[in-house]
Structure formats: structure tokens, C-alpha cells
Amino acid sequence: MEAIVDRIIPPDPQTPGGKDAGCAVFIDRQLKGPYGSAAGHYRLGPFIKGTKEQGPQSPLTPAELYRKGLAGLDRYCKAKLGGKPFSQLSADQQDDVLKKVEAGEAKFDDVDARGFFDALLKDVPEGFFSDPIHGGNRDMVGWKMIGFPGIRYDYRDWVHRHNERYPYPPVSIAGRMDWNVKKS
Amino acid sequence: MAQKLPAKDVAIIGLGWTGSILAHELAAAGLDVIAIERGPWRNTATDYPPGYAPDELRFRIRHELFLRPAQTTFTFRNKMNQTALPIRSWGAFMPPNGVGGGGVHWNAETWRFLPSDFVLRTHLTQRYGAAFLPQDMTIQDWGVTFDELEPHYDRFEYLCGTSGQAGNVKGQIIDGGNPFEGPRSRPYPNPPQDQPFGATLFAKAARDLGYKPFPQPSGNMSRAYQNPLGVRLGPCTYCGFCEWFGCGNYSKASPQTTILPVLVRMKNFSARDNSEVTRINLDASGKRATGVTFVDMDGNEWEQPADLVILSAYTIFNVQLLLLSKIGKPYDPVANSGVIGRNFTHQTISDVTSFFDPQKFIFNPFIASGAIGMCIDEFNGDNFDHGPVGFVGGGYMGQVQTNGRPIETAPVPPGTPRWGAQWKKAVKENYQSAQKPGTGVHGSMYSYRDVYVDLDPIYKDRFGRPLARITMDFHDNEIKQNKFLTDKFAEIFQAMGAKQVVKEYRKAPYDITKYQTTHLCGGAIMGTDPQTSAINRYLQCWDVPNLFVMGASGFPQNAGYNPTGTVAALAYWSADAIRDKYLKNPGQLINA
């Protein structure tokens, strides 16, 4: 997962990538929770494939989709790229594989590879941009990258200040790292 | 076997906006009122305080405040010859759940419909001739007029402390307001909200193009306010977490911030939460409701007898409960007969996203309220000549961007890869300098013979009852309308100086996965003829006179505005009729 999230959001000189931002930790926690088991979704059958406009009808939960998708990705890489799993490929090779999955050219035997990739494209940015209490967006790196102040909550002093950059650093639900006092 | 509870004067199904309004009005009239709500009780201080409520993942992405489809959902298909499939997780609209209903997590856009909207068929036929309307379009007059509803719109706006600029007070047009609005008896209770950079720029560009922009009427407070019930609201802080979220600051009008603090103190009011009404019970004649049956969260079944039943759930649940209770004749689109389920509509929404030079524009999109923004109304309703354009209907449009929450609002120009270094760079470059007004074009959806609700033949809810089935698609009239409006809207963003304007026209087929507001309307419509409407002009059921049906399910078709103002005005109008007419002589109020 860490290798994947770092290709979906690669590191750059100013901002960490998905891995250091905690996106894999985020997804792990989400899959262990209600999201992973599709809790709250309508789960009664029959499961019939309909039109695109009728929405997803798969009986797979996100946790099952990831389990099968990750295994399928490694099997695909090992078969096509000299026996190496995804994590041991070079960054360029990893990008190539993911592009093939995105384009529908790479198929996994027991799960819709493209559906798995669509889930990643939804979940990885959520890990990058959601409040750090969920395990991603470590030290609010995603928010700092774009200038989102988090839950600052009161902008009455800035709503009139048109075309001026908001000057204050972001705050998360758990506060901010530099608020923590180091105790010896 | 249901256990029988002591009888009440009034049983209210659903404690959202209309349930709260009716509960308060009827309790104030001295009746013994019980409200039965499917979802949990919600309080501002404990359920969504500012310290943790601004959590985009929890509330926006994971739908914390909404109904769970596992509890109940709908099936959907575009055409009558398709098999409808269940909506397994929400997309096109977000059914509310819990005390306060959609009033908890709405944006608080508080509009009035146009006078002509209420007499739509008559008005359009007179102006353009009957042949101008598409043949399968089933629009109707409402049976109530704008002038009759005006005092009730006024009442709701003063209850909510709506922030806005009047455009027409008693016929006098006022600069800076909406010149197309129907005459109002007095100005809004509060001045408009402050506008951020993007909305201000939009208004300037619109004015330069000859339009008359005005601030969107907002249920977010522009200042501290005490409403006529004595409940106090605080000023909005433009926190950018409004729609999909509860307001922890008591700044957004909701049942919790306007009515419930008074209602819960009334000795003749009680409520049951986490209790789902499964049926409206009828006597042997089928013409009189005897009360309701509900199931509590432990699965126990209860019967609540009542003399008067108010059905005030979300649009489609109203329709479903009428069908399941066998009240009114189900609509049959083939025979074109029956009433329950007919004239079902939604909204025709499109989006325009504009990209500006990041070196010159800093919009701070996170500074916003739910109903912020500047709008124009030149292309709504019949405010313009439809003769040359070949369609009917329209909508308001505006820079009404409600947030810069980054999971939802991180626009990138077309052609950007969906992931990787280029995507990341584009997100970073455009976050501060893009404008994405979400539901910027807010168009009407008129009713058609083949757009309706009935009961699904296959899929069931957790009690084994049939789910409601939606058959819905866009018709050419709405597609044409949306193209015309979206092009006009985009011109304004061009005039603002955008370097790239991306138009996303609304197209058929209707897509249940894409959010298009929660403004489902119709299915149990009001009207003057029991052959073509489920309820009369007082929202009283034609077939069961001691049942009144609130909400947007009563709209014969949807106008180009957000529905809540009209939903609430109708609730007050109906409450007055119950108190002043029905209670004196319980029975059918209209001889049809």
C-alpha cells in the first residue's frame, strides 16, 4: 500500500508524498472500520449489474476489494515483470503498471482491477486531505500544500479582505503539532 | 402484535422542518401532539460542536448525519422498460434522518418561488399557447397562489432570521435586491451576509453585462438575531462547513435553532426518536386515519392512535408511506390514471468551474457560508421570453460556492491526469484561484408522464416492505434549458477574467451517482382536482381528510429555486387551515 500511495501522490521537494503523509495508515484504518465493511450500505440482493447511471451494485465490501486488488496487483507484476511484487519495482515501472490498470489493460483474475484503482483514486486523496485525526494528512501536509486552514472556524475578520492570502497556519481537530509541549 | 398507546390529538410522522412547524402550531392551539421520528434526537451542543464537527471525512464523505441505505433506500431506473436497482450508497440526493431532518445539514438557501410558478400551466398556456408545451409534460397549477402564501413565507423568514436584500416590497422595486421576486410585505429580518471575493467579482461582472445581481437569501445569520419565538441565533463565522454539517455555532436556521427549544418545553408535546412509522392506519371505511403504527429501535411494534395525522417525512418517504398504507389511488403512467407517485421531479443543476491566473487571484474558497453568494434571476421561471428559445422553465444562477474543503473542492483543469505528480501540482496551483460554485445553475425540472414513483416488485427494506421505485430521466426541455442557462452563466465567469471556463452541461440519462441537490419533489401533489392530485390546496388528503401531507412531495413540478422556503410556507399555510378551518369542522375542506 505504501508503494502505491506514493505513486498516486508522489513526494516533491516542498510536500511529502502519500506514504509520508500517512495515506496507507489512513486507508488501513478506514478498511478496518465501518467503511471497510460497507456498513450502512444497502446489502440485500439480488446483486444485478445495471447501467452506469444506476450506481455500483457489487457485493464486495471495500475491505474485500482491497484484499483481492492488492493480491491481484502483485500477481500481475510478478507474472509480467520478472517475478517482482509491485513494491520492488522502480518508480517508473510502478507508474507504468498503474497506468495499465487505469486504462483497463491490466486485468486481475478474481476482481475488477479498474474498480480497485478507482477506489484508490478516491481513498488516497481522502487520506491526504482529511483531518489528521484519521491517520493521514500527517502534520497537515496536504492542507499546507494548498493553503487550507483546516477548522479555524471563524473568518469574520477575513471575509472582507478580498484577494489577500489568508496568513495563519492550519489547525486540525486535534490542534497542531507545535502546540505540543515536549516534556523531558 | 402492536402494543396500543394512549390516543393523542395529533400524530406527526417525521420531526424535520415541517414536522416541527406543525407540532408547534398545533400544540400552541392546545392540541396534544406526538411526533414520531425515524432517526435520532440531535442537539447542537452534543452532536456537532465546532471543536469536531468540521470533519470533512466523517460528515461529507461518510454521510454521518444522513439516513443509512441499510435502513431503507430506493430503487432507480431511467426508463419504464428497465429493471430498477437499489441505491446501495447515496449519490444524486441525500435523504435526511433524525430530529431536525434536512434542516440540520442544509445550506439554508431560503428562496421564494415566483408568482407565476404557482399558476404554471395557466400562465405558460396563456403566454405561449398550449402547443408550446411538450406533449408528455404534466405540469399543473398548485391551487394556491403566491399572494396567499406571502404571509407564510414572511413568517418562515422571520422565524429563521433570513439574511437578504429585498427586491420588491409591496410592489416597489428596490435596488440591490431581486427585481423579479413577487411583492413581499416587508424586508428580510436581517441584512445580507458579507460576500467573499469571488461572489463580489461575479456580481460586478454580472452588472457590467446588464444583469441585476443580488445576495442569495440566506438562513445563515449576518448578525445576532432573536426570532419571534424568543429563540436566539448567533452571527455566522463563514467557517465553510455548512451543507452536510450541523452548525455548532447556532448560526444556521434549523428546527434546533428556531423552534425546538420552545416546542420541547410545551407540556402537550412529546416525541419518540429512533422510531420508524411503518403504516398509517385506516378505519374500515378506508376514509379515516385512526393513527399510525411504528417500530422502535428494539424492534417493538407500537400503535399510536390519533384523531389527526400529519405526514411530514422526506418527499419520497411520504409517497412510499401513502402507497404502503393504501391511501389514494397509485399512479399508473400507462393508463395515465391515479395520483400517488405522479409528477415526481428533481432539479436541473449544472456546474461551471473557472480557472483564474494564480498570480493574480486568491479567492480563499474556504471562507464561505452555506447560502453565501451573489445571484441573478434574469433566466428563472418565465422572467424572460421563452418563445425564441424553444423550452420552458429556468433557474437562478450565481457564484454560490459554499466551501473550499479539499476532498470535495480541489478542482484541476481538464486534461490533468487523475493522479501522480502532475495531478498534485495542478491541485496546488489551482486551489486558491479556481471558482467552483457547485450548484451554480439551479434550474427547474418540470413533470412528465413517465417520471414517477411506485413500489418496487423485487427489493425490500429491513422490514420486508417493498422499496419505493424511482423512474426518472431528463427530458429534452430540461436539457435545452440547462444548455441555455449554463452558457449564460459561463459568460459571466469569462467576464470576471477567467483564463479557462469549464462547462459541465446536465445531460441525459439522469445519473443516480452524481449529486444534484436533495430537492426531490412531487409524488403526492397538491391541486384542485382529485383525479390529478393527492392533496388539496390546504395539503389535506383528498381521500382521507384527517391526514395532511407536508413537504415538497406536494409540488406539482419543481421551480428553479431551492424548495425549503416554499415547503415551510406551505406548512404554515396548512397549519393555519387546520387550526382555523378544520378543527372547527373536521372534514374535507374543499368540495371538489
Image: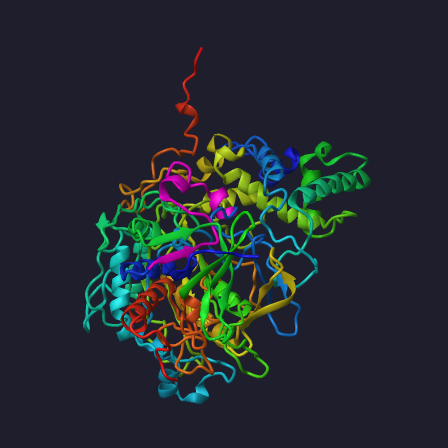
User: Is B131 rendered above or below residue B159?
Assistant: below
x and y percentages locating residue B317 in the rendered image: 50, 63
User: Is A148 rendered above or below residue B567?
Assistant: above
Task: Name the foreground residue: B143 vs B135.
Answer: B143
Task: Name the foreground residue: A46 vs A158.
Answer: A46
Assign the N terminus of chain B to one quadrant of the image: bottom right
User: Is A106 rendered above or below residue B474?
Assistant: above
B48 magenta-colored: yes
Assign the C terminus of chain B to one quadrant of the image: bottom left
Q: How is the image coloured?
A: rainbow
Q: Is residue B425 left or right of residue A55?
A: left
Residue at (74% x, 51% y) in the render: A105
x and y percentages locating residue A65 in the rendered image: 69, 45
x and y percentages locating residue A63 in the rendered image: 66, 42
Q: Is residue B485 left or right of residue B168?
A: right
Residue at (34% x, 73% y) in the render: B586
x and y percentages locating residue B480 in the rendered image: 48, 74
B332 magenta-colored: no
Query: Hey, which residue is sitting farthest top in the picture?
Result: A184
Task: Name the foreground residue: B301 vs A105.
Answer: B301
Residue B119 in view of the camera: yes
Residue B505 in view of the camera: no
Where does the magenta region start and end? B32-61
